[in-house]
């Protein structure tokens, strides 16, 4: 018997099989959940190919958070296939090139606004759009929303405006937890340490994290292993943490707590 038997979960942001979203989807399936994954834009074909490595997922749903029509169509598709949702994993993020690795003065407002729309506001957008399905959850303790995070409390080298987006995401998560709590929907941030994914490689100077994170983490950290992140996601999606909401759960070897 799996921790997520009978759960129906939507996982966004699956691109390649090294992505955190892929690892979470794979782990959810192993724990007995039914899973739908989404892809967006030019990455949709890659998501579709990657999803073939996830057995029993079925057709990938297009979900571009900047396209209201696609959001409506995605909600309709999930409604038709599942009828309800017990979990939603937000693993969506994007920042224009000027927002990363160039300091805080290079990006225009329009570029920052794009990063905010995709990386932060999309959590509220999807939580609201799928709220009726999450309200129908039959899981013990109700439905669970998880947003993938990266410690927004500190200024990290080269992370620049994306760090600001993550700080906003953490604050938004608390407000959503407050608003959705009466619906028995909990909202938590999962703050992972650096993992060598396709998205991470697009961050200038990512190797700085690789070189120093394991030294700072009292438990150590392996940038090639995301299994601890997937395991924690399963716990947050399951009834085991049914009274936890509005929280930032760190999975980073303890590095965030060190001086």
Image (cartoon, helix red, strand yellow):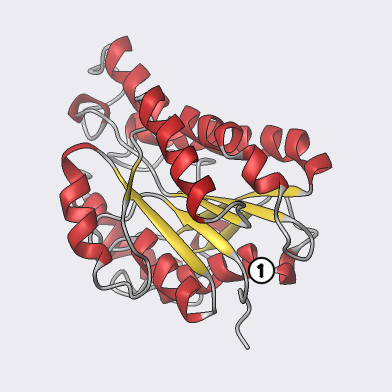
Residue extending furthest top?
109
**Quadrant position of residue 244:** bottom right
Q: Is residue 77 visible?
A: yes
Up-down relation of residue 193 to residue 156 (above or below): below
Identify the residue at the far front of this view.
Answer: 80
Furthest-bottom residue in this view: 1
Instruction: Residue 217 in the image: state x and y as whole percent.
Output: 46, 69
Residue 112, percent across and down?
A: 34, 19
Q: Residue at x 32, y 11 (%)?
A: 109
Q: Is residue 158 left or right of residue 188?
A: left
Up the image or down, 65 lies above or below 13; here it is: above
* Left or right: 193, with 257 as reference point: left
Question: Quadrant location of the N terminus?
Answer: bottom right
Q: Residues within 10 Å of mark 1 (few under 14, many from 20)?
A: many
Of residue 256 and residue 169, the one placed in the foreground of this image is 169
The local secondary structure at tag 1 comes to loop
Residue at 73% x, 72% y is 240
Number of dots carrying numbers: 1
- On the image, the x and y values in percent for residue 148 come to 47, 51
Instruction: Look at 46% across and 59% down and name the residue there.
Output: 192
Q: Is residue 172 above or below residue 109?
A: below
- In the picture as drawn, the residue positioned furthest to the right comes out as 182
Residue 207 visible somewhere in the drawing: no
In-front residue for pair 23/95: 23
Circle 1 residue: 238
> In x, y percent, where is residue 49?
18, 61
Residue 60 lies, with reference to residue 51, above or below; the image says above
């Amino acid at each position: 018997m799996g921790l997520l038997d009978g759960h129906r979960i939507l996982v966004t942001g699956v691109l390649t099989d090294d992505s955190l979203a892929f690892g979470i989807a794979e782990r959810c399936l192993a724990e007995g959940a039914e899973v739908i994954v989404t892809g967006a834009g030019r990455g949709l074909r890659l998501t579709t190919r990657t999803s073939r490595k996830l057995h029993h997922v079925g057709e990938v749903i297009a979900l571009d958070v900047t396209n209201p029509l696609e959001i409506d169509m995605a909600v309709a598709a999930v409604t038709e296939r599942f009828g309800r949702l017990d979990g939603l994993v937000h693993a969506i993020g994007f920042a224009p090139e000027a927002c990363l690795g160039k300091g805080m003065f290079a990006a225009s407002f329009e570029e920052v606004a794009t990063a905010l729309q995709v990386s932060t506001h999309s959590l509220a957008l999807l939580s609201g759009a799928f709220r009726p399905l999450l309200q129908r959850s039959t899981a013990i303790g109700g439905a669970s929303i998880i947003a993938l995070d990266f410690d927004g409390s500190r200024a990290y080298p080269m992370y620049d405006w994306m760090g600001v987006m993550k700080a906003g995401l953490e604050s938004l998560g608390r407000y959503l937890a407050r608003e959705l709590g009466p619906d028995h929907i909990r909202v938590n941030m999962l703050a992972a340490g650096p993992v060598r994914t396709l998205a991470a490689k697009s961050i200038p100077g990512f190797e700085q994290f690789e070189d120093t994170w394991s030294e700072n983490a009292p438990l150590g950290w392996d940038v090639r292993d995301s299994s601890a992140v997937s395991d924690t996601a399963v716990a947050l999606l399951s009834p085991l943490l049914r009274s936890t909401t509005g929280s930032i759960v760190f999975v980073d070897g303890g590095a965030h707590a060190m001086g």
